[in-house]
Amino acid sequence: MTDEELDERLRAAILAEQIDTSSLERSIRKRMRRPRVALWLAGVAACIAILIAAFFRPQTPPLCVAAAEDHRREIVEGEARPWLTDIAAIQTLAEKQGVPRSAIAALGTTGYGLERARLCFLKKQIFLHLVYTKDGEEFSVYLRPRGSDSPFDGSVRQASVGAEDLAYFETDRLTAVFVDERSKAQAAAFARAGARVL
Amino acid sequence: MPTEQQQFEQIALPHLAALLRVARRLTFDPASAEDLVQETMLLAWRGFRGFQSGSNARAWLFRILFNAFHGEGRKQVPAPPSSPAINPGLQEAVEISEALGALPIEQRTVLLLVVVEGFTCREAAGILDLPIGTVMSRLSRARQELRSSLAPMAKEAYR
């Protein structure tokens, strides 16, 4: 049997098959109208959801964004900066900035060890940047005397900026921002411990 | 001026029977074949804006069909058992159909596209996203296998 004969037999056998496509055609026409309406409705629903989410999304305070960036540069990326490591020198520096010595000592009672400190600018305001460690993990604590234009309130609130997790609050004396890049829960736990003693 | 849907229907629906014929030989199940063709048509409709008018609509639709067939991870269903023949002509159709069903899917696909649906090897290569050499070698092997499957039947017929 030649290729041509074989092909002819195959074609004759397959093409002889009766194929009724009328019901299939009807259901295709019906379904063709449906998806575009569904897609249009889904698009409208998605836009509404995005607008609602944007409207109700809690805004991260700019100060927290600045603190997260500072933590990433100085702690995560380890940019070379001059640090004070002597506790007494840190307390003196804190006092000069209006942060009571007692606040530094009090934070030391929470189970976190003070490693080093330096001054930094966040949103054009001077903050004392303290680095604490616990179980080999480093946490940044940014402190400054509470100003008249207080950005926070008394309760501990949380935010995330990029990979950094933050917890922040204010006492009647101080503004405090706690930053950690590994765990939101740990940043919040340290901040709650700090809020009790500051 | 025809609407976009009317244009699509004019271009795509004439190929429904060919698509269904091939889908049946891929799935061996009429309901699954209809589902596959329906899915093909809906995918084609969604992508119709990207279709260039004047290009080969039939090849475009078959390409979508095969992508849908492979993309859905459909299991290759074995060919159904033979059914009793009623007359000699029908008997031959059943036997050829069974021999075709017994071929590996890669060979069966090429035979269906080139021999039954009349695509060139180059067009089949485009539809299946394969080098033309692969299509030609599969076609040659498919013909050999089909011929050897049909040979005993031919001997029976001449007895």
Image (spheres, rainbow, N blue to C red):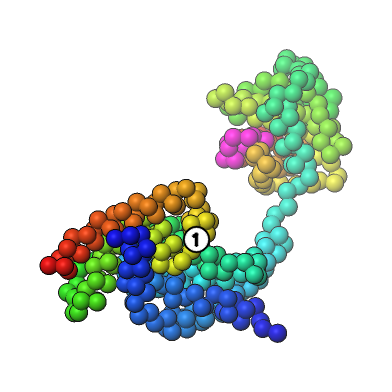
**Residue at (33%, 65%) from the top-left corner?**
A5
Give the residues drawn in magenta, as a range: A179-187
Task: Identify the image quadrant of the N terminus of chain A.
Answer: bottom left
Residue A121 horizontal/vertical position (percent): 83, 32
Give A48 or A44, whichever is nearer the viewer. Answer: A44
The residue lying at 32 percent from left, 72 percent from top is: A13
Quadrant of image for the C terminus of chain A:
top right
User: Eyeballing the image, is B57 above or below A77?
Assistant: below
Residue A63 sits in which quadrant?
Answer: top right
Q: Determine the chain carrying the residue at label 1.
A: B
Residue B12, can we see it?
yes
Looking at the image, which residue is at 73% across and 52% down? Answer: A59
Q: Which residue is mark 1?
A: B120
Q: Secondary structure at mark 1?
A: loop
Visible residue check, residue B75: no
A23 relative to A2 in the view: left or right: right
Image location (x, y in percent) of residue A62: 78, 45
Around disc 1, counting alpha carbons within 10 Å, would you say few (fewer than 14), some (14 to 19), or many (20 or more)? some
On screen, residue B1 above or below B65: below
